């Protein structure tokens, strides 16, 4: 119950992306794309059921290989990303920019 209250507070505090907005963080050999699409079933099955609706789709590319994951804003400074292979990590919010489609 306490976790659900904390999760609700985080969701209320985070600014929502516009429906078509995508955030992207790019490095020379990798990128992370955070979308507003609902989290896919493959990754949802790895998460607690009570948080399924809070997670959105993430696409991570490392050395040309694409991985699907799901993301949620963890706090003001970090996004939490959980991948289809079971790995998870935090990424700083300051690394992301609104994708301009370039």
Image: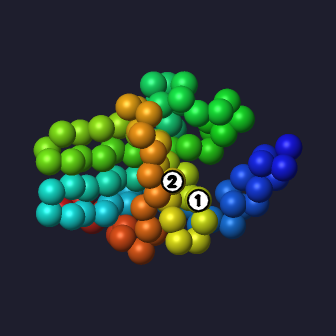
Whichever of labels 1 and 2 marks the residue nearer the N terminus, that label is 1
Crowding around mark 1 (Cα neighbors within 10 Å: few <14, some 14 to 19, many 20+) is some
The image's mark for residue 80 is 2
- The answer to whether the residues at label 1 and label 2 have Cβ atoms under 8 Å apart is yes
Q: Quick check: 85 above or below 21?
A: above
Crowding around mark 2 (Cα neighbors within 10 Å: few <14, some 14 to 19, many 20+) is some
Secondary structure category for the residue under label 1: strand
Which residue is at the front of the view, 95 or 36?
95
Q: How many marks?
A: 2
Q: Does the rendering let one see residue 20?
A: no
- 37 to the left or right of 51: left
- 10 to the left or right of 38: right
- 36 to the left or right of 67: right
Query: What's the image's color scheme?
Result: rainbow
Residue 99: x and y in percent read 31, 63
Q: Does the rendering let one see residue 81?
A: yes
Q: What's the CA distance linking mark 1 and mark 2?
A: 6 Å
Secondary structure category for the residue under label 2: strand
Q: Residue furthest right?
A: 1
Query: Which quadrant: the C terminus?
Result: bottom left
Residue 90: x and y in percent read 46, 57
Q: Residue furthest bottom?
A: 94
- 38 to the left or right of 62: right
Residue 97: x and y in percent read 35, 69
The image's mark for residue 36 is none
Tell me the residue at 59%/59% (across/down).
74
Residue 62: x and y in percent read 21, 48
Tell me the residue at 66%/39% (across/down).
51
The image's mark for residue 74 is 1
Q: Quick check: 63 above or below 18?
A: above
Tell me the residue at 21%/55% (across/down).
30
Query: Which quadrant: the N terminus?
Result: top right
């Amino acid at each position: 119950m306490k976790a659900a209250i904390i999760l609700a507070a985080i969701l209320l505090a985070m600014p929502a992306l516009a429906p078509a907005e995508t955030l992207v963080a790019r490095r020379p050999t990798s990128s992370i794309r955070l979308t507003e699409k609902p989290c896919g079933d493959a990754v949802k099955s790895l998460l607690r059921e009570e948080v399924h609706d809070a997670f959105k789709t993430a696409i991570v590319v490392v050395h040309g290989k694409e991985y699907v994951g799901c993301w949620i804003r963890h706090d003001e400074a970090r996004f939490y990303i959980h991948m289809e292979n079971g790995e998870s990590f935090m990424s700083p919010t300051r690394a992301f920019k609104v994708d301009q489609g370039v």
